[in-house]
Amino acid sequence: MRLPLTVVLDLPYPALGLLIAASHERSAGHDVVTFEMLHDRFESQIRSSSAAPVQLGGVSIGMLKCPRSVVFAVSLLHNYAADLAY
């Protein structure tokens, strides 16, 4: 299922990171994932972006580290909101 761009742009950074991680897991053939799988994928992307930083206007940009507890809390909030929507 594709989310409308307006919904994606309104997601907080940790939720967007988990959404991208879920997309990567699905591309890897994993239709069912756990939070740990998504968090590991998210952390791996952060490490990769730090290893090969991109510069934009002379400033290095990349993914920001986010505490596991914050990522977990965001995942719970979005699961709860999704349950309410159905």
Image (cartoon, rainbow, N blue to C red):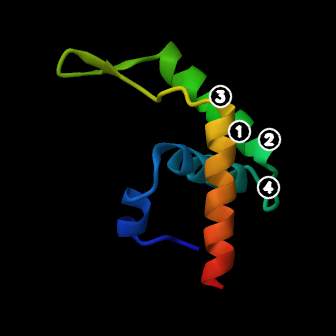
Q: CA distance from mark 4 to mark 2?
A: 13 Å
Residue nearest the viewer, comparing 76 with 53: 76
Q: Confirm whether residue 24 shows in the render.
A: no
Q: Residue at x 61, y 50 (%)?
A: 74
Q: Residues within 10 Å of mark 1 (few under 14, many from 20)?
A: some
The residue that mark 4 highlights is 30
The residue that mark 2 highlights is 36
Mark found first going from the N terminus, 1 or 3 = 1
Question: Where is residue 39 drawn, in percent x and y?
Answer: 70, 39
Which marked residue is nearer to the observer: mark 1 or mark 3? 1
Question: Where is residue 45 drawn, in percent x and y?
Answer: 58, 31
Q: CA distance from mark 1 to mark 3?
A: 8 Å
The residue that mark 3 highlights is 44
Instruction: In the rendered view, tell whether residue 55 sits above or below residue 17.
Output: above
Q: CA distance from mark 2 to mark 3?
A: 12 Å
Instruction: In the rendered view, tell whether residue 56 sits above or below residue 28.
Output: above
The amino acid type, in three-letter code, at marker 3 is Ser
The amino acid type, in three-letter code, at marker 4 is His
Whether pointer 2 and pointer 1 mark residues with C-beta atoms closer than 8 Å, the reply is yes
Label 4: element kind: loop
Q: Residues within 10 Å of mark 4 (few under 14, many from 20)?
A: few
